[in-house]
Structure formats: structure tokens, C-alpha cells
Image (cartoon, rainbow, N blue to C red):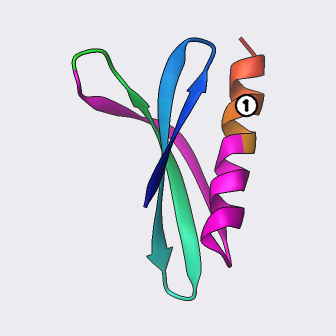
Amino acid sequence: MSRPLDLKGRRFWILSEPMGNNWKATVDEALEDGSSQPVGIDATSDTRVAADDAAERKLRRLLQAY
């Protein structure tokens, strides 16, 4: 599963997949040429929504640092 997220003029995708009894979410940045690049953010939780939300919080904190 994935969900788009637009922040500071950039488009990101939060990608989540089941991992055993948990969910793992990762963040990729969508590039203008149609490709994507991993941002290096991972988050795990017992539900998909919680993992996605944790990954989004990490991304927002990272972008505030710039």
C-alpha cells in the first residue's frame, strides 16, 4: 500500500507492507523524471496506519531541519 504526501514543494510516497505480525513503512521521494529515490526513513508498528503515521512524523521532522 502507498499514500502520497506533498511537503515543501516535493512529493513523497509512504510505502507500507506487512512484516510478520507488524507493518513496515518506508518513504521514497518522487522525482520529476518519474523515478523515485529512497529517503532512508523506516518505521514499524502493529498496524499499517500507525507505521505510516510514524514515517510521516519522521519525514516532517527531517524536513524542518533544513
Residue drawn at point x = 30 percent, y = 15 percent: 32
Indicate the amino acid at tag 1: Arg
- Looking at the image, residue 61 sits to the left or right of residue 51; the answer is right
Element carrying mark 1: helix
Residue 14 drawn above or below residue 52:
above
* Residue span colored magenta: 34-56
Q: Is residue 61 magenta?
A: no
Q: Seen from this angle, which residue lies furthest bottom?
A: 21
Where's residue 10, x and y in %? 51, 17
Q: Place residue 37 in its image quadrant.
A: top left
Q: Place residue 65 in its image quadrant.
A: top right
Q: How many marks?
A: 1
Residue 47 drawn above or below residue 49:
below
Residue drawn at point x = 47 percent, y = 76 percent: 18
Where's residue 34, x and y in %? 23, 25
Residue 52 drawn above or below residue 56:
below
* 10 Å crowding of disc 1: few (<14), some (14-19), many (20+): few
Residue under label 1: 60
Residue drawn at point x = 75 percent, y = 42 percent: 57
Question: Quarter of the image containing the C terminus?
Answer: top right
- Looking at the image, residue 29 sits to the left or right of residue 66; the answer is left
Q: Place residue 38 in its image quadrant.
A: top left
Question: Quarter of the image containing the N terminus?
Answer: bottom left
Where's residue 16, x and y in %? 48, 61
